[in-house]
Image: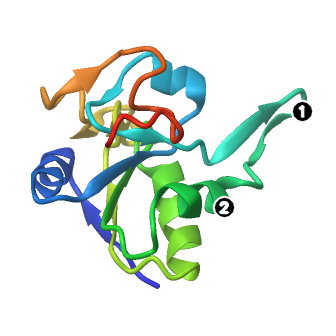
């Protein structure tokens, strides 16, 4: 299954049209700031050995969002969210868009220069509310 690659501004526009924002960063990254309205389901779990794929990722997404949900998916820069799009596409999610630049922005690996601004740098709505709309079980209605 394929997915689109869109900018943070395009993701924000999609959210105005009813798409949902799935943030796949770690809980720690999410707690430091996230796109207003985002739901956090980490793609990776942090273990003593480092980061490993969250074995419950797809199950957690299915519990939170039916496969018919239109999702914009973001991480810090776009890499993890691309992987999440691949996994969810293989599970029957048909409306997926990876946010290039994610929340922080994407830099050129050779030069370190920013090539795509992230959600925060674009001046889009950001939240830092604790225990709020980041939790799939919070019941906040996002």
Q: Residue furthest front?
A: 139
Residue 124 % position (x, y): 14, 31
Residue 10 % position (x, y): 14, 54
Which label number is shown at residue 59? 2
Instruction: Left or right? Give the position of 100 relative to 135.
Output: left
Residue 114 % position (x, y): 28, 34
Q: Residue at x 24, y 59 (%)?
A: 19
Residue 107 % position (x, y): 36, 38
Instruction: Left or right? Give the position of 66 relative to 99.
Output: right
Taking depth in this image into account, of 115 and 99 the one nearest to the observer is 99
Q: Residue at x 28, y 37 (%)?
A: 37
Quadrant containing the C terminus in the rendered view: top left
What distance separates the C-alpha of mark 2 from that of mark 1? 23 Å
The answer to which quarter of the image holds residue 60 is bottom right
Q: Residue at x 33, y 74 (%)?
A: 95
Q: Secondary structure at mark 1?
A: loop
Which of discs 2 and 1 lies nearer the camera? The answer is 2
Q: Secondary structure at mark 2?
A: helix
Taking depth in this image into account, of 126 and 133 the one nearest to the observer is 133
Instruction: Left or right? Give the position of 138 relative to 51.
Output: left
Q: Is residue 83 above or below residue 132?
A: below
Crowding at mark 2 (Cα within 10 Å: few <14, some 14-19, many 20+): few
**Disc 1 target residue:** 49
Q: Residue at x 37, y 76 (%)?
A: 68
């Amino acid at each position: 299954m394929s997915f689109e690659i869109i900018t943070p501004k395009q993701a924000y526009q999609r959210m105005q049209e009813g798409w949902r924002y799935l943030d796949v960063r770690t809980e720690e990254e999410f707690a430091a700031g996230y796109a207003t309205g985002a739901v956090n389901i980490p793609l990776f779990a942090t273990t003593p050995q480092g980061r490993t794929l969250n074995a419950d990722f797809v199950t957690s997404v299915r519990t939170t969002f039916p496969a018919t949900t239109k999702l914009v998916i973001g991480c810090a820069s776009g890499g993890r969210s691309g992987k999440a799009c691949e996994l969810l596409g293989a599970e029957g999610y048909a409306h997926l868009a990876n946010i290039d630049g994610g929340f922080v922005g994407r830099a050129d690996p050779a030069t370190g220069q920013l090539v795509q601004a992230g959600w925060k740098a674009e001046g889009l709505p950001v939240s830092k509310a604790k225990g709020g709309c980041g939790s799939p079980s919070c019941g906040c209605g996002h």
